Amino acid sequence: MKKLLIAFALIGFYACSETVENVETETQEVEAVVETVSMNYYGDTIETAGALKSDAFYAQMEGQDSLYVTLEATINETCKVKGCWMTVDMGNGEEMHVRFKDYGFFVPTEGVGGMNVVMEGFAFIDTLDVDYLKHLAEDAEKSVEEIALITEPEISMNFEAVGVVITE
């Protein structure tokens, strides 16, 4: 009887240890599949759910000169001097210049090109004068020759963000 009791105990112990091994293996497999997404907030904390992509944004912007919106895009470039502006890819070769409300916050000066960004604020059509365009080119560390080629103002879509989330 004693041997039978020991046999059942060993079988039970073996069965439990194998289950723990299986659970550990499955957990490791799941952890390998889960991708860590880092979200870095700048300015006001904003809600990223429901952000418009460029095509939906342009549909809502049609017929208006400004629109308060949460917008999702890809960062092309940021100000290399202090991160006080960025440009984002709006699709179809279009780019939008983004400034930050009252220069109240800045984004990284490098390493974020190509990353996803969600931003909340006012989109508007604006005329950027030659002096401002040259200032932007200097901030972007363009050559003297490239800056000298800027001779005309530019009418373009711009954005004043109250908050930005950059996703890595």
Image (cartoon, rainbow, N blue to C red):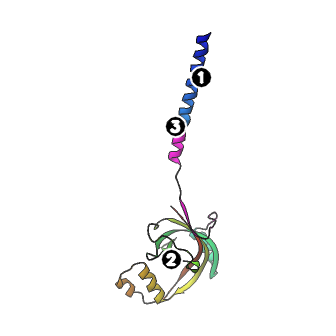
Q: Mark 1 or mark 2: which is in front?
A: 1
Which label is found at residue 56? none
Mark 1 vs 3, N-terminal side: 1
Residue at image x 52%, y 73%? 106
- Residue 160: name its quadrant: bottom right
Mark 2 closeness class: few <14, some 14–19, many ≥20 residues within 10 Å: many
Label 1, label 3: how far apart the Cα atoms are: 20 Å
Horizontally, residue 138 falls left or right of residue 9, namely: left
Where 31 falls versus 116 (above or below)?
above
Secondary structure beneath disc 1? helix
**Label 2 is placed on what type of residue?**
Trp
Mark 3 vs 2, N-terminal side: 3
- Residue 120: name its quadrant: bottom right
Residue at numbered disc 2: 85
**Label 1 is placed on what type of residue?**
Gly
Q: Residue furthest top?
A: 1
**Label 3 is placed on what type of residue?**
Thr
